[in-house]
Amino acid sequence: MLLVVSSSRRPLRVLHTADVHLDSDGGGPAQQAAHNERGRRGFRRIVDRALADQVDLVLIAGDLFDHNRASDETIAFVRRELDRLHQPVVILPGNHDALRANAIYDRHDFSAGASHVHVIRRLNGQTIEFPELDAVVWGRAMEEHTPEFQPLAELPSRDAGRWSLVMAHGFFFAERQRPDRSSPIFADEIRDAGWDYLALGHHHARTDVSQGGVAAHFAGAPMIEWGPGDPEGAVLRVELSVERGVRVEPRPLAARAVREEDAQPGYLENTVDQVEHPIVRQARASVQAALALAIDSEARFGHLDRESGTRGMRAAVVVRTSRDDGDVGLGLRFIVQTDGALRAHLPA
């Protein structure tokens, strides 16, 4: 399908994520608190990545919550994290947090006091317009996860004058058939949609299902990738421009993105999850705390990180491990890279 593109559209940068599954079951009561915190840490890093990458729009394509019984504490946490964002956020209910009566999105109005947050609520489809971005977003809220529910049904024609983005949550079928899985998304529907980008959720592995000239991706579950083999979760950054078309790139969530105003003494204090230090890795000791002793703000553009070729800010820190409660890595350099990522390096 030939897409007619308006030459007047400004470039657009989007963060696409899905299947965060906050408050999912964590293997029993003893592990539940730690499991919940791990999920929140993942969502916090998603917000960090949106800020660091300076995206224009955030799309959460279903299953932000693992179920409709999410605790008030988790709801409050999500509100606080969304408040950190100033760019528009669009949330699509998925099969785990479907838009049923008295469900999460029925009980809680995430737009209250946060006009930048939008929840797709209409069962027959809803278009949200962002004139300041030259963009529109369409999605269809899910009430029941059944084979009869078709996430792309009733998709309107694309607006050729604006970036046209679709959100959908369901199971992908490469061939048209009688679906044996719920919420089917068929390849020919994607091909015939004609919209610029389809932000999909439900498949937990990142998958490119683009068809013809239509870009369509499952972002994957960011936390499913965390583990010994691959310690970095990821989201998708989607860049749309008239000159380059649609480009999709995975963006890591391994380290909290740090803003310049945050990089000051005390910022790293008691951040258990932020240090990936070679000595700590070799000792197989978990990090208990990291304390920033000093920030060399003058070195922000003066220190060249040889590994990545980017310039950043230095901080001297002490790393404390659980093995012997000793301090290692005194003088360790933390490089706040220009892309916002936080990386650790031994002193030269």
Image: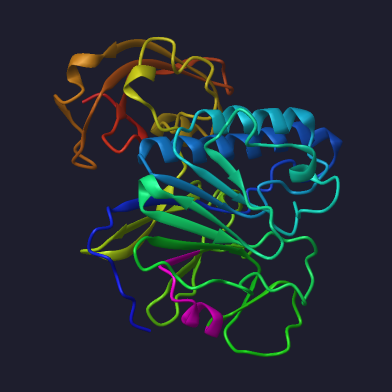
> For the magenta stretch, what is the residue range?
188-198
**Does residue 227 appear in the picture of this structure?**
no
Q: Nearer the viewer, residue 271 or 331?
A: 271
Q: Is residue 165 left or right of residue 296?
A: right
- Note whether 202 is above or below 149 in the view shown: above
**Does residue 170 appear in the picture of this structure?**
yes
**Residue 128, horizontal then vertical, whole percent:** 53, 53
Residue at x 45% of width, y 80% of height? 211
- Note whether 5 is above or below 14 in the view shown: below
Q: Is residue 51 left or right of residue 120?
A: left
Q: Quadrant of the C terminus?
A: top left
Q: Quadrant of the N terminus?
A: bottom left
Which quadrant holds residue 203?
Answer: bottom right
Which quadrant holds residue 160?
Answer: bottom left
Most extreme residue toward the left, as rendered? Answer: 302
Residue at x 66% of width, y 36% of height? 110
Q: Nearer the viewer, residue 125 or 223?
A: 125
Q: Is residue 300 left or right of residue 177?
A: left
**Residue 8, horizontal then vertical, whole percent:** 24, 58
Residue at x 29% of width, y 69% of height? 5
**Residue 4, horizontal then vertical, whole percent:** 31, 75
